[in-house]
Image: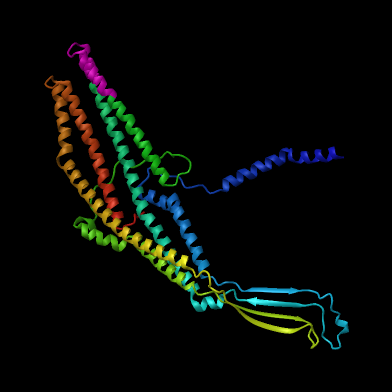
Amino acid sequence: MHGQSGGRGRSVLSRPGFVLGLVLLAQIAIAEEPSPPAIPSPLSLPQALELFERRGFALLLADAAVRSAEGDAEIAAAFPNPAIAGGAGHTWSYDPNRCASAGCSNTPWGGALTDQGLVADLLIGKRRLRADVAEAALRAARLQRDDAVRSLGALLEEQWVQAVVAGALVRTAEQAAAASAQTAQLVDLRWRAGDVSEADAAIAETAKLQAEQGVDAARQQLAETKASLAFLLGERSGTPAFELPAELPDCVPPPELRDATSDDLLARARERRPDVAAAKAQLESAQSGLSLAERARIPDIGLTASYQREGTGNEALTPPTAVFGVTVPLPLFYRGQGEVTKAEANLRAQQIASDKVDAQIASEVAQSYAAWQSARSRLDRMQSRMLERSRRALDLVDYQYKRGAASLLELLDAQRTWVATQANYEQNVGDWWISLYQLQAATGETPKT
């Protein structure tokens, strides 16, 4: 019998239809699980910001912190539930049948109701202070989430710019490698014809190999920046294959920054930055917390009402009896001094933190403004003369070398100068945009999708 029962149990699990059904259910569950949106290709900056706000890890954590603060506010605003108690028993040594009057009983029962300090809490105001503390903390959490969008959005903008610049540097390195390959081929032909020495051929080939090394390094940098960008976008499945625009937009200063001074930007930052408002909310929460700690020294008074009986007549052991009482803890040994001290220290810490935020804003505005001014100056110099002259010098030396009027070293030096200048130009454009985004973040502007 046992063997037959075990065989029947195994036959159910080993049936092909049952196993196939489990596989199909698993596939359906996997298919119905929502998958994160793919990264668009080519990835524009507004698309990157939109993905970041939807699934970036930092913002998801900030959302969770806001949700937690909402729960704390709901807890602080809640009224304590009244408590009700009841009980019944039996008196073994009492016979109600011997009672001369009616209404005797050997079954005692009773009940009690207490407000759990609700009335006293409302009169003293502790609940209101707890709600004030939690509401201020909730405002701070929401503002900190806004500040995360501001600061991390600027970080995303910077990473996107660096990825675009890395792509441009790859193309520059490939152009340099192609030019070096042509030069090496030309020198090799001339060496075989006996027009130049073997040393020139070795130098040209070395320059070609160095240019190829530069291509590999540039491609590695591009892969690293794209991986960092994908992480900021909340990518969970490794680095996906996506492309970026070939070049950055034209460097046109926003109207509000063209004539702005450092003092103007600092005043704007103090007025608009979410972390300033968050620090004020934290300070308000600490002030309310100190008031609550001081108010908590007043003992929690509990009101109770009870009713008990064991019979109803005059001869009943316990006639119907109603009792109203008050419970007052005696603050003889401890009066909340530690809570007050801790609240005072927290208030002092929040005041220092608020001052620190203000000083940090001044530093960030000054640094980002200086960086943007420097980036503007370097880019203007590059665009006005430096880029064109390096290209012109390379063309002239290349022309002279092909006609024997310039040496190979002069040609290679001109090629290196042009490559370095072109790479600096791409980096200068990236620096201009990065410094602009950092300045906008420092003055409290949130990136727009």
> Nearest the camera: 324 or 73?
324
Quick check: is 103 in the magenta stretch? no
Is 168 situated above or below 148? above
Left or right placement of residue 162 versus residue 35 in this view: left
Q: Residue at x 27, y 23 (%)?
A: 208
> Nearest the camera: 29 or 321?
321
The C terminus lies in quadrant = bottom left
Quick check: is 189 in the magenta stretch? yes
Is 219 situated above or below 352? above
> Nearest the camera: 282 or 108?
108
- Across and down, in percent, residue 211 comes to 28, 27
- Across and down, in percent, residue 407 comes to 15, 21
Q: Residue at x 17, y 13 (%)?
A: 195
Q: Residue at x 29, y 42 (%)?
A: 247
- Across and down, in percent, residue 8 comes to 81, 40
The N terminus lies in quadrant = top right
Is 197 situated above or below 133? above
Left or right placement of residue 326 versus residue 12 in this view: left
Label tally: 0
> Nearest the camera: 131 or 33?
131
Scheme of colours in the image = rainbow
The stretch in magenta equals 184-209
Is 16 situated above or below 47? above
